[in-house]
Amino acid sequence: MTKIVKVSIYSIDFTDLWKFGPKLYILKHKMKSAMEKPRKQVLLTTPYREKGEEYEYWGSNVSGLIRYTYDKRNSNGLRFLKKNIPEIDILEFPSKNEYKRALKRGYDVVGFSFFTYQIPRILEMVEEAKKENTPELWAGNYGALTYGMEEKFDKIFVGYSEEEVAEELGTKIDELEHPMIVDYIGTPMGIRGFPLAVVFTNRGCTQNCKFCQTPVFCSKPYKIPLSSIEKVVKNYKEVGVSEIVFMDENFGMYKKHAEKAIDILDKYDMNWYPMTRIDLLDKRLDDWYDRGFSGTLIGVESLDQDSLDNVGKNIDVEKTFNVLERLEEKNSFVIGYYIIGFEDDTIPKIKKNIRKLNDYSLDLVQICIITPLPRTPLWEEISEKYGIISDDWSKWNTKHLVWDHPKINQNEMRDVLEWGFKEAYPKTTFFKSPIKYYLRKVDRFGHFKTQAKMIKDFIISNSGVKTKINDC
């Protein structure tokens, strides 16, 4: 069940009057009842989910049940908002009935955090809010960038919006605080292996890949305060979590800041997995490995140099091969992001490159069909040159062809995607991944400490402490 915690606060703060003397301090009590004004009561929510609709990372990229699971039950964005503006209420992937019950509380504002492919469900939820006469409707997250959304909502927040939401409520954030965000790596049978905690060190990206919405969503990249990072890492350590994934768009973009963040993780004996770029990893891999690096989430994108150049990826394919080889030598866990359906792609070309990718020991390949998302350079280029063929936003999840490809039709693209899911995740991967995981830990801690850690992780993951760990 999704838990809602309501906090009543007021927009007048007389705390500083004490320094002007006791008379003014007494005066504050006389003035308060006449002047205080309740702030807006705000509910922020993700799309609702019914049973069986859970988003599962492996399951969305692998065919079959011989695989692992990473069931994402937390909303990173809403948790940051709740942590920094505690008076708001949040719903993270509620059921439809939970959402409808929450509306009965009579909020002044209901805000929605969503991606483009979730728009149909969000618009359904908007209608439910209107039935309850909700005065104000807000939209945020990447889906709010979609054309036409300004007609559906009273206010749209572009980018990470803690300060903007705080301003709407008449308050201020002195320093951004990092919430605890923990999910679990497990199996489809419901057995969990270890908890995996999220840390952000920066926001935005200095690259300008044509297919990416981030330069529009967060036009001015910035750093997360190191004090906030250390505080959340310390909290993770206290509840027994020792595996960290850096979910930055581009970890290492701010080199000195990233190194200081690594120092914090090293201080608390953490293992970590950054989302980063091939060129950064090429330079830093050996040093990072000695400081707890255990794997990476990395954008391979394509093994065709012309395709990479055409979308502004600025990665050398040969360097990609070299980095993947080094990662394999170090028993590093690797999730690779891979795109198919570039305008020069053909079915044989796609299959040839995915088979080539199989020469390297990737633990999961997230295969996506190139999608011209709204407000990206790719949207302008594709819509003008070839045309958009789908106005069903639910298909804009990078698993459907939504534009008129010159060489591949929608059915062919669907079939090669399904083929890719099977080809890029042979059943042997299920057994190789935990061996790599164990060997990497042994290299850092030795056999005895590694085995003790794995037993502890198993107990923590399966003993029902999820609520405590995920407490904002």
Image (cartoon, grey):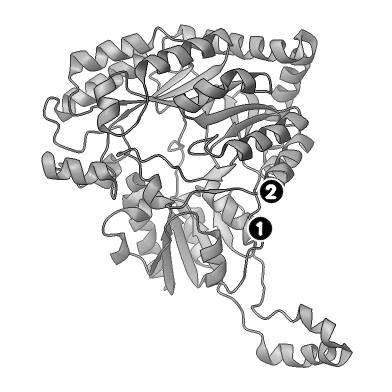
Residue at 45% across, 24% down: 278
Badge 1 element? loop
In this rendering, position of residue 380 left or right of residue 65: left
Checking the image for residue 228, the label placed there is 2
Q: Quadrant of residue 13?
A: bottom right
Q: Quadrant of residue 268?
A: top right
Checking the image for residue 282, the label placed there is none
The residue beneath circle 1 is 175
Q: Can residue 25 be seen at all in this image of the molecule?
A: yes
| Amino acid at pointer 2 | Ser
In this rendering, position of residue 382 left or right of residue 115: left
| In this view, 216 is above or below 443 | below
Point out residue 461 in the picture as x, y percentages from the top left corner: 68, 29
Badge 2 element? helix
Residue at 66% across, 53% down: 177
Sequence-wise, the earlier of marks 1 and 2 is: 1
- Pointer 1 and pointer 2: residues touching (CB < 8 Å)? yes
| In this view, 310 is above or below 229 | above
**Which sits in the foreground, 65 or 244?**
244
Q: Residue furthest right?
A: 22
Q: Quadrant of residue 39?
A: bottom right
Q: Badge 2 local density, few (<14 within 10 Å), some, or many (20+)?
A: some
| Amino acid at pointer 1 | Glu
In this rendering, position of residue 416 left or right of residue 454: left
Q: Can residue 463 be seen at all in this image of the molecule?
A: no
Residue at 28% across, 19% down: 304
| In this view, 101 is above or below 207 | below
**Which sits in the foreground, 382 or 5?**
382
Point out residue 52 in the picture as x, y percentages from the top left corner: 44, 36
